[in-house]
Image (cartoon, rainbow, N blue to C red):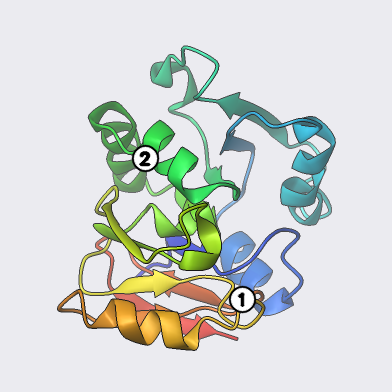
Amino acid sequence: MDEQIFLIGGNPPIKNHTIVNKIVSSRKIERIVIFTVYRENWEPYMKKYTEVFQSHFPNLNVDYLLLDTEQIDFDSYLDADLIIIGGGNTEKYIATYVNQEFKKYIDHMLKKEAKIIGFSAGALLLGEKVYVSPNDNSDHQIKIKDGLGLFNQFLISVHYDSWNDKANRDKAEELVNVPIIPLNDHSCLVLDKLGNIIEKID
């Protein structure tokens, strides 16, 4: 069972060396593709995603793609070793990334043994169903939305500690028939390519 999907409960950088070692140990990483959405000052922030990998692989090739503002030719990114889906406004991320074309690309890359890391919103949208916390939308409501379907036996709750989200998560769990796994800001849930849990790193 190879670790291929990493769901991170908070924002970059990854501070836990156990998580970093799991990502870098099994294969050489030459190309990273980061998917994000446009917001002011987005470019300097991207270094937070990559700096921890650049220390391991100094000749890294990194691409930053904004699917909400650019037409992307996914065939140009089939040699990525590591795909990162960033964090931010969860509903905007869902509207941008939950579609058949992106799902096809991600499924194809998993078959090619690429690793996928989702941070916060980017982790949430990888599930078949997405729990959107009241802390994470302007309506301040619990929402359950459709995601990309990389895992389906559970949902996740991100920023669980910093958002103090237990009561919300418990209520949301009554709306779905699978558990909602809490992820603190520095936690990571590690899955294989079929969406089975390998381990949780806190």
Q: Residue at x 55, y 47 (%)?
A: 89
Q: Amino acid at mark 2?
A: Met
Is residue 29 at least partly visible in the picture?
yes
Rendered location of residue 185, percent (x, y): 65, 74
Identified at 60% across, 48% down, the residue is 88
Name the mark nearer the viewer: 2 or 1.
1
Q: Is residue 26 visible?
A: no
Circle 1 — which element? loop
Q: Position of residue 9 (x, y in %)?
A: 56, 69
Residue at the limit of the structure toward the front, as seen here: 139
Dot 2: element:
helix
Residue 96 lies, with reference to residue 46, above or below; the image says: above
Left or right, residue 100 beside residue 140: left
Q: Quadrant of the N terminus?
A: bottom left
Q: Which mark is residue 163?
A: 1
Q: In percent of the image, x 32 and y 39: which residue is there? A: 98
Which amino acid is tagged 1?
Trp
How many angstroms separate mark 2 from mark 1 (CA)?
A: 32 Å
Q: 55 or 184, which lies in front?
A: 184
Q: Position of residue 195 (x, y in %)?
A: 28, 65
Please name the residue that numbered disc 2 is placed on. 109
